[in-house]
Image: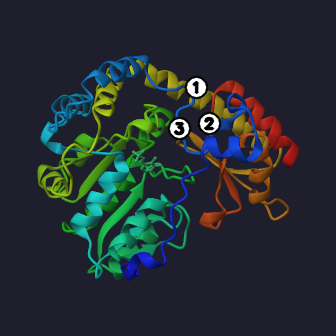
Amino acid sequence: MNFNPQISNLPIYEAGKPIELVIREFGINPKDIIKLASNENPLGCSPLALEAMEKSIKSANLYPDDSYYELKESLANLYMVNSKNIVIGSGSDQVIEFIMHAKLDPNKAILSAGVTFAMYGIYAQHIGAKIYKTTSPNHDLNELKALYNQHKNEIKVIFLCLPNNPLGECLDASEVYEFISGVDSDTLVVIDGAYMEFAKFKDNKKAINPKDIVLLSNAIYLGTFSKAYGLGGMRVGYGIANELIINGVSKLRAPFNITTPSLAAAIAAIKDQNFIDQTLQNNLKEMSIYEKFAQDNHIEFIPSYTNFITFVFDNNKNSTKICDNLLRKGIILRNLQSYGLNAIRITIGTKEQNIKVLEALKKEI
Ligand SMILES: *Cc1c(COP(=O)(O)O)cnc(C)c1O
């Protein structure tokens, strides 16, 4: 059996180590496992969302309302945009996939920072499109501009991950708007705001407002319920842009692309901004404990605007070895060797989890 050439050298994506695997391989009691590898919310999700999901299960025999009327209205209110400016995806991942299919072919290209969310490159490869990346790992706007101007005819999608996963850095909103103004109207700038709630909370200069994005002819904002809202398992994300972009992207969406409980959870979660506030406060407070640990132990870290922190090790340490040793103790972190970095990304956990992680890490360094 032959497959399309563009996917033949594409590896199967390994999305962090699942808890089940650690239980099987190392025989660790499930309740002792600390998983801080996928930037999930350590506080769970809003109790309102849990209740709504439970209720919704009773109508499992019915397809969900495919217009997603109530969810779009809730998001429209939250962001002060119109429902017509919103597309819903099974995670914002799926919206990225829609965008790729709507804008790319094998003669076109995407542009991104050197080290950023892996799915941009993977979806581009599905199509056989070319991938331009800056040599700088983080978002260097001068380099992005230069690469864009050099390959203007090919580049149809530019990704700005704000703040950036897996590094944690974030451009200022004013720099972003200035950058977009230099991009042609037929090239779509994707602002991936998966962690924007965290960035905004820490520093308002980072806040990109979807209501400003809908005024632009060549930009789309992506948000998700997987991170601050704590609903990664429910798979709900969204894109916000002007109506023309939303109409184009929505042609790729199959009906009923999110489930009835997912829909109920997302609608209820928006109502509980109190939970988001608690999440953001826990995150910032606990983040400072990791920063202090890094400083005290002379570990380089990247100041983070997200719910994770990236520790970068010098040549005397090996991130793979550290991650493997911690895994044996039931602590799952994200090794960044696959990004070419001798670094570990740690999702900020609860106070209790963080104490255990830092204790274990201390023995490795
Ligand atoms: C987690 C994440 C997403 C999307 O996650 P979904 O669960 O598919 O909504 C998108 N971009 C980045 C940078 C992420 O880290």
Given contact means CB atoms under 8 Å apart, are the residues at marks 2 and 3 in contact?
no
Q: Which residue is mark 3?
A: 40
Mark 2 — residue?
348
Which amino acid is tagged 3? Answer: Glu
Q: CA distance from mark 1 to mark 2?
A: 9 Å
Name which quarter of the figure residue 332 lies in: top right
Q: Is residue 272 visible?
A: no
**Viewed as shown, does residue 47 lie left or right of 343?**
left
Tag 1: Cα neighbours inside 10 Å, few (<14), some, or many (≥20)?
some
Upstream in sequence: badge 1 or badge 2: 1
Determine whether label 1 and label 2 are within 8 Å by CB.
Answer: yes
Badge 1 marks a residue whose secondary structure is helix
**Which badge, 1 or 3, comes first in the chain's sequence?**
3
Q: Is the C-beta of the residue carrying label 2 under 8 Å from the nearest atom of ligand 1?
A: no
Q: Residues within 10 Å of mark 2 (few under 14, many from 20)?
A: many
Count up the numbered dots.
Answer: 3
Q: Nearer the viewer, residue 72 or 307?
A: 72
Q: Residues within 10 Å of mark 3 (few under 14, many from 20)?
A: many
Pointers 1 and 3 in contact (CB under 8 A)? no
Question: What residue is rendered at 56% in x and 65% in y?
Answer: 137
Quadrant position of residue 77: top left
Q: Relative to 211, is 199 on the left or the right?
A: right
Which of the two discs, 2 and 3, sits closer to the camera? 3
Read off the residue under disc 1.
282
